Amino acid sequence: MNDESVRAILAAHVRAIDGTCVGCRLWWSRLSPYPCWQVLWATSRQARAITARFLGGLR
């Protein structure tokens, strides 16, 4: 996956205050809400990229 894919996932899956994805929560509202794993993955990947850029700049 590239940065463009990560940005697309984060744009489509916006986290609510409680950490669940707004779109997934609306879709699954009749069942039980659950954390959106796509947002967790994309956020983690974005954080790793930012950290790598920061640490790469220190060398």
Image (spheres, rainbow, N blue to C red):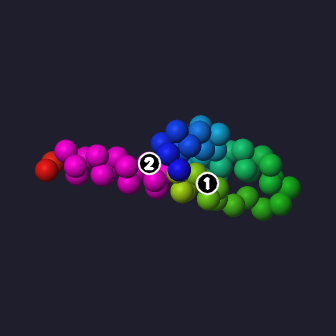
- Name the secondary structure under disc 2: helix
Position of residue 51 measured from the top left corner of the image (x, y, whole percent): 31, 51
Q: Main secondary structure of the magenta part?
A: helix
Q: Residues within 10 Å of mark 1 (few under 14, many from 20)?
A: some
| Residue 20 highlighted magenta (yes or no) | no
Q: Is residue 50 left or right of residue 8?
A: left
Check disc 2: other Cα within 10 Å, few if <14, some if 14-19, many if 20+: some
Q: What number is the disc on residue 46? A: 2
The location of residue 6, given as percent across then percent down, is 53, 45
Residue that lies at the very extreme toward the right in this rendered image: 30
Q: Nearer the viewer, residue 12 or 6?
A: 6
**Along the viewing direction, whichever of 8 and 20 lies nearer the viewer:** 8
Q: Quadrant of residue 5?
A: top right
* Residue farthest to the left, as pictured: 59
Where does the magenta region start and end? 43-57
Q: Residue at x 73, y 58 (%)?
A: 33
Q: Residue at x 74, y 50 (%)?
A: 25
Considering only vertical position in the picture, is 5 above or below 29? above
Q: CA distance from mark 2 to mark 1?
A: 12 Å
Identify the disc placed on residue 38. 1
Whether residue 10 appears in this view of the structure is: no
Q: What residue do we see at 50% from left, 45% from top?
A: 2
Q: Secondary structure at mark 1?
A: helix
Left or right: 36 as drawn, with respect to 5: right
Which residue is found at the position 60% from the left and 44% from the top? Answer: 9
* Amino acid type of the residue that numbered disc 2 sits on in the rendered structure: Gln
* Amino acid beneath label 1: Gln
